[in-house]
Image (spheres, rainbow, N blue to C red):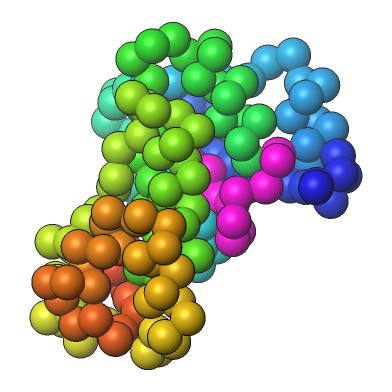
Amino acid sequence: MDDDLSSIVYWYFSDWRESAIPTVWTLRQVDSEKRIPACLRIYVVENPAVFSTILDSLNSCANEGGEPAALLCTSGPASAAAIRWIQRCLDISGGDCRIYYYGDFDVKGLVMGQTLYRLFPGRFVPWRFDAKTYREADEKCLLGLSFESAELDKLWEDGDALGQAIMRHDAPDRKKSSPGIARLEIG
């Protein structure tokens, strides 16, 4: 169980600042803040290196009048602060707001994707987090460490459809690193 001070979330809102500098809030701040930004898209990443890469790319391009969007980093499994921030943002943003999740192709990333899918049904959209992206990373030799047999068993146990599809149709023994895949998207 997360307490209200050590549970944190990193976030950035595209309309709030000229430069892409993230904000860090504790669960206490998330719960007490009266003003959470409204947006149509919440982009969630679990990997701080991916978050940083995206922020760097935002610094190099101007906002061309697009819809306001939030970028959130959970820095691993989603904390209570991250889940609560998403809930509050969805509440204020209305029914059209969607969560776009982008995680590592490892057990933790796949499980987190499943968790967000279960917590926010109808709002969850995989963002470059599918078998096609996995194959693309494999073709570009962005291979990670080997999956351990216990990790492969966990994917089958949990009924993770994405994980199972990857294991059946792609290189079943390799994890994919999101920072490498982020370079496919941004660079």
- Could you say where residue 15 lies in the image, as x and y percent from the top left? 48, 26
**Corner quadrant of residue 130:** bottom left
For residue 88, above or below residue 149: above
In the image, 174 versus 23, the foreground residue is 174
- Could you say where residue 24 lies in the image, as x and y percent from the top left? 71, 45
For residue 169, above or below residue 87: below
- Please name the residue shown 86% across and 39% down the image: 4
- Could you say where residue 137 lies in the image, as x and y percent from the top left? 20, 74
In the image, 163 versus 139, the foreground residue is 163
In the displayed structure, does residue 92 sit left or right of residue 154?
A: right
**Corner quadrant of residue 48:** bottom right
* Res 165 seen here: yes
Q: Which residues lie in the magenta part?
A: 70-81
- Please name the residue shown 36% across and 34% down the image: 124
In the displayed structure, does residue 64 sit left or right of residue 29?
A: left
In the displayed structure, does residue 88 sit left or right of residue 50?
A: right
- Please name the residue shown 58% across and 25% down the image: 87
In the image, 77 versus 96, the foreground residue is 77
Q: Is residue 40 magenta?
A: no
* Res 21 seen here: no
